[in-house]
Amino acid sequence: MAGTQDMTLTLRRLRQNAFTRELAREVSLEQSRLIQPLFAVEGLSTPTPVPGLGETHRDTPDSLLKQVEKDLERGVQKFLLFGVPAQKSESTFSQDFTAEQVANLRKRFGTSIWLAVDVCLCSYTTHGHCGVLNAERTHVDNGKSVQALADAALAFAQAGADCVAPSDMMDGRVAAIRSRLDRAGHDYTTILSYSAKFHSRFYGPFRLAADSAPQKDKLGPDLQNRATYQIDPASPRDAYASSLRDANEGADFLMVKPALYYLDILKDLSTRIPKPWFAYEVSGEFAALELLAQNGLVDRGPAHVEAWTALFRAGASAVLSYGARHFYDWFTPGSRLAQNPPPRVGASERTLS
Ligand code: PBG
């Protein structure tokens, strides 16, 4: 672009081509900062796609291992597992199915994967709430729920999880989980707290995948949704209080969820609370882009990359996204690199040390 004699250039000089733009960037995307969610479903005979979530499936124990194998070939090494048991209960929960999947993944892939396991009861309860109900079935009992959540976290740590991720929003669960893990000698297991988790309408596809929607017809007025424990979207102060509390109780990583509609929260809290902050691009916001792309209204890859860029720009140190496994398909930083994509790191090239 030489010799145009255009003396009016000021800021556009730094935007002139892909190389210059790359050097000027403040935010860079790396696959190592993306986490891929996985669903393992008990009693399922074949893997089934989740509506709206692209190549995310409800997996069988078998297809789960195959999926992770494929993901490793695509360079994904970090995962968040949701276990969906066949048996639902009111108050006594078996973690066996989920723990078994954790153990299988660990046995098969060793330390070549980082595995977080979601800790919640909504896929385990008959009514679909994230905790145990009181005897009158008018609210979610905090104390009883926290005990069940700590039991679950311990089971997952014992099965080999690197990280346990409470998403239930009960009070005091981070402290209870930390002390339960420490007493059992799992002092290196990290806790990722869904600390700024909002009462959002964007969890729809997830609830189909996790079989975890509240069973409204069987429940009273305060239990029609999760508003009595998740944070009100109009209460940013509550998100700060909740995240500060969880940090003080021993959470290692904090999270904002959903992500795109809560960028102000992410920006604000990541500067005020000195912890690594994760952003969860939830099922509904991911599906929104997928539906736009399916209708030819956006270019799929670049649209997803733009959404991720916003999250890192706002302060995320990692992003949970159903599209993590598409990173190298979607992310092509410049035209020259687009023709020569970076090599994919295969499972065999990874060291296990
Ligand atoms: C709750 C939980 C939810 C998600 C993960 N764990 C939401 C909810 O049902 O309240 C949402 C994830 C998504 O939408 O992608 N246990």
Image (cartoon, rainbow, N blue to C red):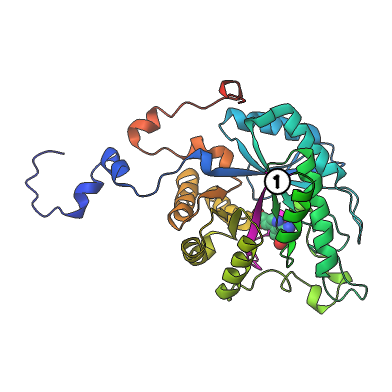
Q: Position of residue 283 (x, y in %)?
A: 64, 54
Which is more toward the observer, 277 or 232?
Answer: 277
What residue is at 64 percent from the left and 34 percent from the top?
113
Ligand 1: give its quadrant. bottom right
Q: In the rendering, at what x and y percent does residue 160 appear?
A: 75, 38
The one of 190 and 15 positioned closer to us in this rendering: 190
The residue that appears at 64% across and 56% down in the rendered structure is 251
Q: Magenta segment range?
A: 186-207
Q: Which residue is mark 1?
A: 187
Residue 331 x/y as whole percent:
45, 39
**Residue 241: x percent and y percent?**
60, 71
For the point 47% across and 47% down, which residue is it? Answer: 305
SS class, disc 1: loop
Q: Is residue 39 magenta?
A: no
Left or right of 59? Residue 144 is: right
- At 81% from the left and 46% from the top, the residue drawn is 155
Q: How many marks?
A: 1
For residue 138, above or below residue 348 = below
Kindly tell me whether residue 60 is visible in this rendering: no
View extreme (bottom): residue? 221
Q: Is residue 203 magenta?
A: yes
Q: Amino acid at mark 1?
A: Asp
Locate the N terminus by quadrant: top left
Q: Is residue 150 left or right of residue 203?
A: right
73 in relation to 131, above or below: above
Quarter of the figure with the C terminus: top right
Q: Nearer the viewer, residue 256 or 186?
A: 186
Residue 38 seen? yes
27 vs 42, nearest the viewer: 27
Residue occupying the far top of the picture? 348
Counting other residues with Cα less than 10 Å from the Cα at mark 1, is it few (<14), some (14-19), or many (20 or more)? few
